[in-house]
Amino acid sequence: MQRRAFLQQTASALALTSLFGRAAADAYQQAFKAALPQAPWLAGLESVAQPAYDTTVAVSGRWPAALSGTLYRNGPARHDIGNFRYKHWFDGDGMLHAYRFDGKTLRHQAKMVMTTKYTEELAAGRPLYPGFASPVPNPAPVSSADAVNVANISVLHHHDKLLALWEAGSPWEMNADTLDTLGTYSFSADTDGAPFSAHPRVEPDGTLWNFGYLSAAGLLALWHIDAQGRVVKVGTVPAAPMGMPHDFVVTDRHIVVLLCPLHYRGIEGSTFLDAHEWAGDAPTRVLVVDKNDFSSYRWFELPAQWVFHFGNAWEDSQGVIHFDAARAPTPTLMQDNFRRYMRGDAGEERPSQHYSYRIDTRQGKATESALFEQSFATEFPVIDPRVSCRRNDRLVMLHRKATSKAAHPMLTGVSTYSYSTDRLESYDYPATVIPEEHLYVPRPGSAPESDGWIVGTALDFARLETQLNVFDAQHLQDGPIASAALPYTLPLGLHGKFVA
Amino acid sequence: MRIANRFRPLITLVYGTVVSAVAMLSSAAQAVEFSITIENVSSDSGKLMIAVGGKESFENAEGSEPQPKPLQIILPARTGSVSFTTDALPPGEYAVQVFHDVNGNGELDANFVGMPKEPWGFSNNARGNFGPPKFADTKVDVSTDTAISIRVDK
Ligand SMILES: [Fe+2]
């Protein structure tokens, strides 16, 4: 009964959205502008004020002498084109940021990723191509995924290349010093233009694994790249067109991809997001592929669920794969809330809960259990990159507590967890600050997971500044030990990478 | 958002079994002249691989060899534009598909997920959405003598 009501609600919300989108292209823009004065957190969803930044500010607090380098970040930044506003948070064109710090100052540099789409639309002064979830008036035909690639999800620094990543097409190569866009990046002629997802997993030795979702084709692409950026092998696995997988995990032996029951139904006459339909009574399909042989794979099942992000994975001597993820019961956050945000409406809270998973490859069984209480919502799980694809003890993530008094609907703080001690430590930001992804930055020369910092950006919408905060990873709950504030706000972004 | 499977019809349709234009000849008495110019040819290397077919050929091409077989024409590539005229077809509605087989291996080269790496085009210069266009978007009325041009592009 509940599910039925939910489905009806979703269906009518989608229908309304698309009518709304067609009837008045800038109704979202008007609604957003009207809502902003009463809901200052929406500063995080305004279009970026400038196409480029280069600002240096002083740092405050006890900035660790050993902590210097660059935090590169990416995220949707241009949400409006003239009087047209995108209808979904994920449609915004990507902007690449570099936060460079040396202990004394913080230099913030940023530039829009000059994708084909952004460049053409800038020249035309109007949207030309349909977005991920935004219909546009009189759209031009889309002959390839890269024609609508907005390079807005994450960033990868690998074999001395800086790549801005989307998930349905090519990486965009950026100049690491100037942040100028160099063009789409091709690992080899045979892989040119193939989908390269935004969450590649990089092993401690630099070996890189990734996947790509080819919805209509019923294929998952798999990538194996060595530390020098050479393609070791690529392949495809036949997979029902479902799930819109965004992230995955890798152990020392296997690749694991969850295909949640968000079924692809065909894109004719709709947007890519609306081409997918949630089937809450269908299972999540779990693909386990042999890293050494992409033609060797098995399928497992889990209950219906929605996952954007995984923490890490490892495999024990009994053939059991262990991994963790921020798990939501449905993709409603993406289907509904992230549209509402664009018209200045927070919508209902849709917390995701952290889960642990076991895939017993000998018994042929996948199981799941909640790691934390439901009142403790998590997202953006990360680990010490030196234990990627190996057994990890520590987890760093953003959280939101059910008791939160935050003046916004987003995540509210940062936490660390140790499996071995079962200890959870949290820092809650002030009610008018929205944290973005926080990364674990190892202290140079330290043993994995032993010593380091947690570094992340946050939007303070009361002071109208974007800040960068540094925590001692061993004493997170004491709050930031050092920080720096920019004299402006930036649109809320997605993922980053620290480069020492 | 992806192309792979939807490009297979293109590959199959153009590259099923090669049938000569002569074999395709139906009753010449009814034939019309259909002139096709391929534009934006980027080099002299390789061949232009052209297929002309009706709705059935087009739609039966999904995942198998098209039936009935389309008229298939192979021309040497020449930088700029290349034209030809055929009178091998009875009057009707046709779609034209062409690709520039730059390396002359007889195939539309694709990356590992099936997306074309060589220039291609359809009648009406239809590009489709995330894959080849539909017959309805590519069809040309050839009930009388007709001339069209098609741009090939990656
Ligand atoms: Fe992500």
Image (cartoon, rainbow, N blue to C red):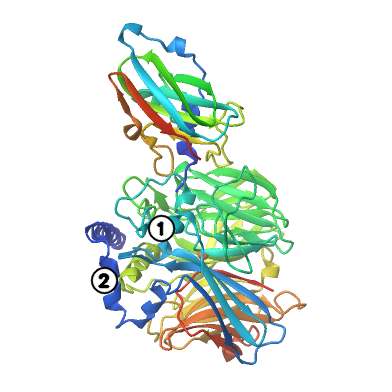
Is any part of residue A419 visible from this angle? Answer: no
Task: Single out the residue that lies furthest toward the right.
Answer: A445
Tally of marks: 2
**Residue that protrudes farthest toward the front in the picture:** B80
Characterize the local packing of mark 2: few (<14), some (14-19) or many (20 or more) Cα atoms within 10 angstroms.
some
Out of A453 and A356, give the one closest to the viewer.
A453
SS class of the residue under badge 2? helix
Identify which residue is drawn at 35% across, 54% down.
A274
User: Does residue B36 lie above or below B109 as drawn?
Assistant: above
* Residue underneath mark 2: A30
Chain at tag 2: A
For label 1, the residue is A123
The x and y percentages for residue A187 are 64, 50
Q: Position of residue A36 (x, y in %)?
A: 31, 79
User: A211 and A1: which one is in front?
Assistant: A211
Q: Chain of mark 1?
A: A
**Left or right placement of residue A383 versus residue A413 in this view:** right
The correct choice, above or below, for A467 with respect to B102 in the image is: below
In the picture, the quarter occupied by the C terminus of chain A is: bottom right
Q: Residue B71 location, x and y as percent?
A: 43, 18
**Quarter of the picture holding the N terminus of chain A:** bottom left
Q: Label 2 sits on what residue type?
A: Gln
Instruction: Count residues near mark 1 (Cα–Cα under 10 Å), then give few for <14, some for 14-19, many for 20+.
Output: few
Q: Which mark is residue A161?
A: none
